[in-house]
Image (cartoon, rainbow, N blue to C red):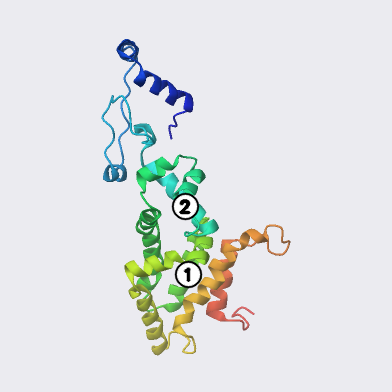
Amino acid sequence: MTRISPDDAAAHNAVADTGPPARIAAKERDASKPKLTAAPTDIHAANIGSSAPAGSAARRPGRPSGAARGPAQRARLLDAALTLFARQGIVETSLGEIAREAGVTPAMVHYYFKTRDQLLDVLIDECFVPLRASLGLPFQENPDDPVAAITQLTERLVQIASDNPWFASLWVREVISDGGLLRQRMHERFGFAHQKASLLAIARWQKEGRLNASLEPALVFVTLLGMTILPLATSKLWRNDPLRHSIGGAEIARHAVALLVQGIGPGKGD
């Protein structure tokens, strides 16, 4: 990101405020410099506001330069938002804090996202909806094999949490906790159809004798999350624990699958 220092801004304002002779001298100096090609804007920036014409003398206060815009800058802001949402919650996070986390001015955040709600909607569309679809694939790909479906779902949950350090903490804080804003917004936009389809699949497997009939379908996913996401969200506390410091995603996934599929009784190899 290109930042404008206070000295540069002061020099710019000095040129803009001087009389005609100073302006002519400034233009002559500028004419001797090589021309720079403006960086292309990304589609998201174009949707929010058009860039200033090339060669314009001044921009609105806080408006980022062409070199500062683009997918990389926007992605940096979204990453900062996810980090803070996972650390302290969505409600407790302001756009100003996101700007500080990303190392940019508040004007830069407002250029892309006018409100926190707009930013959250972007995260839902571009981040959480694809993750949600990914977590539903094991049930679609294994319609007649509940063990394979639940095993793959477990492994996928752990993999997603391992690839995205914010995922486990954010899920605990904003999805499975009471009053989570992310869960509320997701339900408002998408309802419960996805969840109902998964519960119907579990009930069907039970009737077909493919799954333990004593299981409560509504608790299967809660149990699965408790055995995967919760340990991953608290794994930072294990760094100095001599008994658990070496436990990672692979061990958590293996333990969860073994407990779900075989229970606490002796395993087949025992």
Q: Quadrant of residue 33?
A: top left
Q: Position of residue 200 (x, y in %)?
A: 36, 82
175, 91: nearer the viewer: 91
For the residue carrying disc 1, how many other residues have a C-alpha within 10 Å: few (<14), some (14-19), or many (20+)?
few
Q: Is residue 164 visible?
A: no
Between 70 and 226, the one nearer to me in the picture: 70
* Residue positioned 37% across, 32% down in the render: 67
Q: Nearer the viewer, residue 155 or 161?
A: 161
Alpha carbons under labels 1 and 2: distance apart: 18 Å
Q: Is residue 226 something that shows in the picture?
A: yes
Placement of 268 over or under 249, stated as above or below: below
* Marks 1 & 2, CB-CB < 8 Å contact: no
Residue 149, which numbered label?
none
- Residue 164, compared with residue 227, is above or below; it is above
**Dot 2 alpha-carbon crowd within 10 angstroms: few under 14, some 14 to 19, many 20 or more:** some
Looking at this view, name the residue that lies furthest to the right. Answer: 242
Comes first in the chain, label 1 or label 2: 2
Q: Which residue is mark 2?
A: 94
Q: Is residue 237 above or below residue 225?
A: above
| Amino acid type, label 2 | Ser
Q: Which residue is mark 1?
A: 179
Question: Label 1's element?
Answer: loop
In the rendered image, residue 46, in percent from the top left (x then y), is placed at 27, 42
- Residue 98's place in the image compared with 159, above or below, is above
Residue depicted at x 35% and y 49%: 114
Residue 109 x %, y % = 41, 44
Side of 72 relative to 51 (left or right) = right
Q: Position of residue 22 (x, y in %)?
A: 34, 12
Q: Secondary structure at mark 2?
A: loop
Q: Three-letter amino acid code at disc 1?
A: Gly
